[in-house]
Image (spheres, helix red, strand yellow):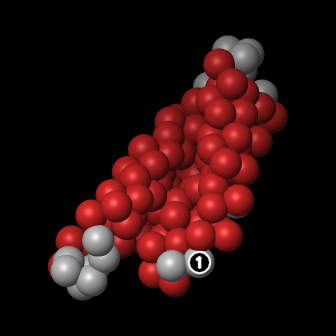
Amino acid sequence: MFWIKIGSLLMFLGVAFGAFGAHALKGKLDAYYMDVFKTGVLYQMIHALGLFGVAWLSTFSNDPKIFWAGILMTVGVLLFSGSLYIICLSGVRAFGAVTPLGGLCFLAAWILLLTTKM
């Protein structure tokens, strides 16, 4: 299943980024940026798990909202978590303008699942 593969990839990367943050970035980022990095990992992991829910729901319904929820969760991880990682690693805070777009993708994905016909 497509969403299981995407969710698994994002979970793998979330674990890898979490380990990278805990070990390679320890002492290189101040407490604020370390917290921002951890937020990116947390939201990536939550929404990767959400993709397993999308995969499961797609076995019960052909409602296109389920597919679009998966797309929005994936794009949300790229925009939200990705922008936080870039901010932390580059120090360029301008990428913060992208972060709320990822958050909106997350919100829209959950609303789509809420309104899915089962």
Viewer-side residue, 49 vs 86: 86
Q: Residues within 10 Å of mark 1 (few under 14, many from 20)?
A: few
Q: Quadrant of residue 32?
A: bottom left
Give the amino acid at mark 1. Val
Residue 34 location in percent, x, y? 31, 65
Whether residue 8 is visible: no
Q: Is residue 57 left or right of residue 63?
A: left
Residue drawn at x 65%, y 69% is 95
Q: Which residue is mark 1?
A: 92
Viewer-side residue, 26 vs 32: 32
Q: Which image quarter holds the N terminus?
A: bottom right
Q: Is residue 112 left or right of residue 13?
A: right
Residue 106 location in percent, x, y? 63, 41
Whether residue 28 is visible: yes
Residue 71 location in percent, x, y? 71, 50
Residue drawn at x 40%, y 53% is 39
